[in-house]
Structures are given as structure tokens and as C-alpha cells.
Image: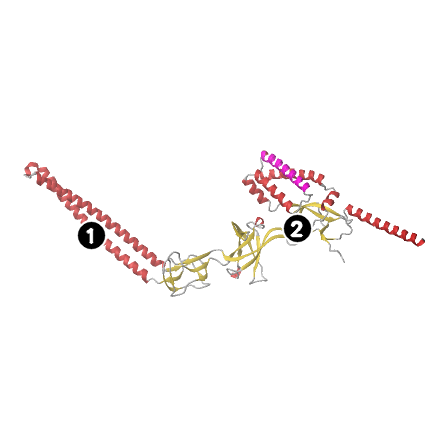
């Protein structure tokens, strides 16, 4: 019996210890400290950040001209080869000119015949003019004599008919002269055309540059039937090059004219080259549901070490900060499992957040009104539409059990943009989109206080690189301990 009482006494003591440990655990968990959960942390510090977009593209000359032949014939002579430096107007090839020289001579002979024919027609015109003058004189003389001439009416009518026939012959002679003159002009044009064709047998460079491609050899026959065959490709100036880089649609919004660029090529792995964005082409390229845009980058080519066709690995710098408050990227992505509870316990719960959100929206509307020069009617409509949007989002959040990150946050942003686009004019919307590139993004990050408790901090995120994200504003100071991830449990 004594042993049984001792057994139950020790069992009661063990149960009391277990209950006390459970109470302590639940109390600490309710306070939000989660002492049994270790975290990996880092200190917010200051330093440089360089945001960039990585891509690749092909090295191209700034200007490439394809030189072809407008004539068909055999290549008689080549005066330029690969890598030859040529000047504008320099002779670089010749098509066999014999056929075209013969055509020039034939055209000149036809022109001479036409000129002789014109001379003969002009002589006939002068003779017709003399004959008309004679007939006119006879007619005037007999009509002046009247009855004294002793001519019958039939004879006088014959003289009048002869005069009219002479006038008709004069008109015909004039027409023949005009026809002969037109034939001379036509033959002159044929001579000019044949001389032009003869001149085209000499292929000349249209620009100063370097021959980067030659497609023919001496003795080869080129046929210019439907299109001019390409004989040479000439790059204008290889001391400067351009890179045609494809940038994904998700990154193209951050790329603009003048952005600095660094790149390298496989031929010089230890050497880095620099350039800048010249233009962003608006025409999209879609391949397997992936949309990209071509970005043209101009760069110097010292020593002409970069060759056309090389593949360049490109990094376009879209934002730089020399000395800014920053946190690791992992800290900007981290969110504890009980984030909603921690927000409530920290005083940043729903009721307070709604009031803050309304004040922030009012402030944003005023900022947009000043930035985009909104009218009074636009401001009122925007405030009304934003309140309706917030009320709808709040109701959906309550139905879904809270949680405002990830896809839901992206959907809200899309709805906000839809509201803005419906209220703003086209010019205002374009101005707003342009200003969105560098606009800080609101975000809640998580820190450990001096007592080891997890607490949220509301900040505004700026640019980011591969390691760090800029803190553009908010409730965070240098040296604060930010949580990057939950530590892996130790075995």
C-alpha cells in the first residue's frame, strides 16, 4: 500500500511539471516571441547597389550596306576582298563591259541616223514653205486681174486647189519634222540609258568602310533578274559597333535610353567593354509565348577587336546607389507563418491598418494630383473609385481568411492600375507609367528586437541587385536585425 501511494505521488508531480511547461509554451507563443524557433538574421547596413538586367545579343556594325549588281553578266575583275578598307566611290569590281559597250555604240549610231533624218525633214519643210509661197503668189495675181486675165472659172478654181494642196503639204512637212525631232530625243535617251548601263558594269563602294563579306569570284556570272545579287557587304565604321539584345517584357520597363551597359564576349573573357542604350525598339518578338523587345546598344570598339557576329553577354544598369540603406534580398522575401497574428499583437492590426491605409490613399491621391495635374473632377472620381476598390478587396480578404501577399497583391495592383487608367487621360497615364520605374514599393519586413521578439516594420523598397534591396524609406535604421529565413532545425 505504501508503494502504491508513492507511485501516485510521483505521477502527480510529473503531470504538474508537464502542465506547467505547456502553459509556459503557450504563453510565450501567444506573446509572439516563438522562442523555440530560431531565425537566420542579418544587419541592415549601408553600401552600394547596382540594379541591372542581364541578357545577350549579337555584335553588329552600326551601318551595313549590301552592294549588288543591277546588271547580269560575268565578273571580269575584283578590286576588293575580305577586310579591304574602301572609300566612297572606289571601284571594287567590274562586270564584263563588252556587251554594254556595243549597245552604247549601236545607240549612238541610231541617234546619228535620227539626226540625219531630221535634217532631211527640215529641208522638205523649207521646200514646202517655198511651194506654198509660190502658189499663194499665183493665186493673188490671178484674183487681182479678175476678168482681164481671161481665165475661165474652172482654171481659177484649179489654181485655188493647188494652193490649198501646197498648204496641206506644208502641214505634213511640219509634222514630219516634229516626228523626226522626237525620234532624235528618243535616240538620245537610248544613248544615255546604254551609257548608264555601261557605267553600272563598274561596281563602286557607296560608303567609306570595310568589306566584311564577298560573294563572287572572277569569272562567275551574276544574274539580275528579279533582284540585285549581293556581291559585297560593307561595314561603315568598325571603330563603333552596336549590339542587338533581346530583353524580356518583364524587364523592359526598367530599360531606357542612356542606361549604361557593360558586356563581354567569349573571345576576351577577362576583358569588359562598356556602352549605352541607344534605343528600345517598340516592335515585339513573340516566340513560344515569350515576348521580348530588341534593345539597341552602341559601344566603342577600340582596336576593332570586336567582330561582327560575336555573341555579347550584356548587363544593362537600370539603377545605381552609391551609399544607401540596404537589406539582403532574402529579408525582403521572408514572411513568418503567423504573420497575421504578429501584426495584430504589434498594434498593426486590421482596424488601425484600415485607417492608415485610408490616410495613405488620400496622400497618394494628392501626390498624383500634383504630379499629373489632375482636375478637381478627376480627383473626386479617383478617390471614390479607390474607396470602392478598397472596400471590395477588404471583403474578399475577409472571405478568404486574410493574406494579402503573392498573387492577391498582384491582382490588387492590376485593379488599381485599371482604375487609374479609366480616370487618367492618355498623356497622364503615360506619364504615370514612366514615373513607376523608380517608385518605391511598400513592404513589411520582419526584425528581431533586443528581447528576441519578432516584430514587423513597414518600409518602402527601392532598387535591388543580386544580393541587396534598397530601403528607400520607412521604419528601419542601420544596424537593425532583419530576419532572412527560419533556421534549419538542429538535430
Question: Secondary structure under badge 2?
Answer: strand
Which residue is more in the foreground, 166 or 83?
Answer: 166
Which residue is more in the foreground, 42 or 297?
Answer: 42
Residue carrying label 1: 120
Which quadrant would the C terminus be assigned to in this image? bottom right
Q: Is residue 322 magenta?
A: no
268 in relation to 175, above or below: below
Q: Position of residue 360 (x, y in %)?
A: 66, 39
Seen at 30% across and 61% down, the residue is 102
**Left or right of residue 1, residue 91 in this image:** left
Q: Which residues are magenta?
A: 377-399
Mark 1 Cα within 10 Å, few/some/many (few <14, many 20+)?
A: some
The answer, for residue 440, to whether it is visible in the render is no
The answer, for residue 49, to whether it is visible in the render is yes
- Between label 1 and label 2, give the one nearer the viewer: 2
Mark 2 Cα within 10 Å, few/some/many (few <14, many 20+)?
A: many
Q: Position of residue 369 (x, y in %)?
A: 60, 37
Residue carrying label 2: 469
Quadrant hosting residue 270: bottom right
**Left or right of residue 172, residue 445 in this image:** right
Quadrant hosting residue 435: top right
37 in relation to 218, above or below: above
Seen at 86% across and 52% down, the residue is 14
**Left or right of residue 447, residue 172 in this image:** left
Whichever of callouts 1 and 2 sits on the residue coming sooner in the sequence is 1
Q: Which mark is residue 199?
A: none
Amino acid at each position: 500500500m505504501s508503494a502504491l501511494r508513492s507511485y501516485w505521488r510521483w505521477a502527480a508531480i510529473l503531470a504538474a511539471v508537464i502542465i506547467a511547461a505547456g502553459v509556459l509554451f503557450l504563453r510565450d507563443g501567444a506573446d509572439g516571441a516563438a522562442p523555440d524557433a530560431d531565425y537566420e538574421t542579418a544587419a541592415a547596413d549601408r553600401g552600394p547597389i547596382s540594379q541591372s538586367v542581364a541578357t545577350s545579343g549579337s555584335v553588329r556594325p552600326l551601318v551595313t550596306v549590301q552592294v549588288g549588281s543591277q546588271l547580269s553578266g560575268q565578273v571580269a575583275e575584283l578590286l576588293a576582298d575580305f577586310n579591304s578598307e574602301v572609300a566612297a566611290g572606289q571601284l571594287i569590281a567590274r562586270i564584263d563591259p563588252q556587251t554594254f559597250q556595243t549597245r552604247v555604240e549601236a545607240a549612238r549610231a541610231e541617234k546619228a541616223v535620227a539626226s540625219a533624218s531630221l535634217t532631211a525633214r527640215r529641208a522638205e519643210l523649207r521646200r514646202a514653205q517655198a511651194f506654198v509661197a509660190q502658189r499663194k503668189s499665183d493665186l493673188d495675181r490671178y484674183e487681182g486681174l479678175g476678168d482681164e486675165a481671161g481665165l475661165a472659172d474652172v482654171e481659177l478654181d484649179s489654181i485655188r486647189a493647188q494652193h490649198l494642196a501646197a498648204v496641206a503639204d506644208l502641214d505634213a512637212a511640219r509634222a514630219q519634222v516634229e516626228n523626226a525631232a522626237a525620234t532624235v530625243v528618243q535616240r538620245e535617251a537610248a544613248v544615255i540609258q546604254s551609257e548608264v548601263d555601261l557605267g553600272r558594269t563598274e561596281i563602286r563602294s557607296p560608303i567609306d568602310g570595310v568589306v566584311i563579306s564577298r560573294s563572287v569570284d572572277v569569272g562567275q556570272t551574276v544574274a539580275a533578274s528579279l533582284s540585285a545579287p549581293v556581291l559585297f557587304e560593307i561595314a561603315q565604321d568598325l571603330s563603333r559597333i552596336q549590339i542587338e539584345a533581346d530583353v524580356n517584357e518583364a524587364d523592359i520597363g526598367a530599360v531606357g535610353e542612356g542606361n549604361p551597359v557593360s558586356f563581354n564576349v567569349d573571345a576576351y573573357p577577362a576583358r569588359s567593354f562598356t556602352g549605352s542604350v541607344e534605343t528600345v525598339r517598340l516592335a515585339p518578338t513573340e516566340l513560344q509565348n515569350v515576348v521580348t523587345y530588341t534593345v539597341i546598344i552602341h559601344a566603342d570598339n577600340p582596336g576593332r577587336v570586336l567582330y561582327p557576329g560575336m555573341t555579347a553577354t550584356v548587363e544593362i544598369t537600370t539603377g545605381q546607389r552609391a551609399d544607401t540603406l540596404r537589406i539582403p534580398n532574402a529579408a525582403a522575401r521572408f514572411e513568418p507563418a503567423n504573420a497575421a497574428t504578429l501584426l495584430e499583437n504589434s498594434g498593426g492590426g486590421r482596424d488601425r491598418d484600415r485607417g492608415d491605409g485610408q490616410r495613405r490613399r488620400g496622400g497618394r491621391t494628392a501626390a498624383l494630383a500634383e504630379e499629373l495635374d489632375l482636375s478637381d473632377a478627376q480627383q473626386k472620381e479617383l478617390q471614390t473609385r479607390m474607396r470602392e476598390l478598397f472596400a471590395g478587396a477588404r471583403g474578399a480578404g475577409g472571405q478568404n481568411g486574410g493574406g494579402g501577399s503573392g498573387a492577391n497583391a498582384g491582382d490588387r495592383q492590376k485593379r488599381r492600375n485599371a482604375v487609374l487608367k479609366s480616370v487618367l487621360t492618355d498623356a497622364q497615364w503615360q506619364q504615370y507609367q514612366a514615373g513607376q520605374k523608380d517608385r518605391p514599393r511598400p513592404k513589411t519586413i520582419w526584425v528581431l528586437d533586443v528581447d528576441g521578439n519578432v516584430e514587423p516594420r513597414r518600409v518602402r523598397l527601392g532598387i535591388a541587385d543580386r544580393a541587396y534591396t534598397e530601403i528607400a524609406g520607412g521604419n528601419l535604421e542601420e544596424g537593425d536585425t532583419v530576419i532572412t529565413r527560419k533556421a534549419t532545425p538542429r538535430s
